[in-house]
Amino acid sequence: VYIMKLEIKQLVDTKGLNRNQLSKELKIGYKAACNLYDGSVERIYFDTLENLCKVLDCTPNDILKLDDTDK
């Protein structure tokens, strides 16, 4: 069984952004930005994903990972 996870910590840190700056860049609430940063989300809107890719200068392939839960 595979579970898709969002992994943005490294890219956010590389850009030198903190969670507050991330929330402002994405035009979302601070708590939502923290959840994205921590990867503790079960769903993501396409517009948020698109904004994430713009802010982090990446593609969805760079931040969406498949985790094999059978390991």
Image (cartoon, rainbow, N blue to C red):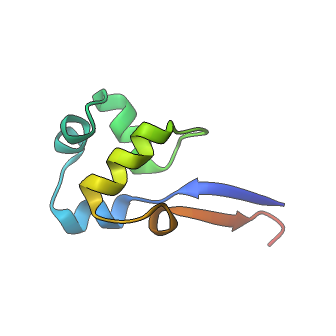
- Report x, y in % for residue 28: 31, 29
At x 49%, y 50%, the residue is 39
Q: Can you say which quadrant of the picture contains the C terminus?
A: bottom right
> Which residue extends farthest bottom?
71
At x 39%, y 48%, the residue is 50
Tell which of 26 and 30 is nearer to you: 26
- Report x, y in % for residue 29: 30, 26
At x 52%, y 39%, the residue is 44
- Report x, y in % for residue 19: 24, 44
At x 84%, y 61%, the residue is 1
Task: Judge left or right: residue 64 versus residue 16.
Answer: right
Task: Judge left or right: residue 52 versus residue 66.
Answer: left
Task: Judge left or right: residue 14 versus residue 38.
Answer: left
Task: Judge left or right: residue 5 versus residue 2.
Answer: left
Image: 28 above or below 10: above
Image: 25 above or below 2: above
- Report x, y in % for residue 27: 25, 31
Q: Quadrant of residue 58?
A: bottom left
Q: Quadrant of residue 16?
A: bottom left
> Which residue extends farthest top?
29
Q: How many marks?
A: 0
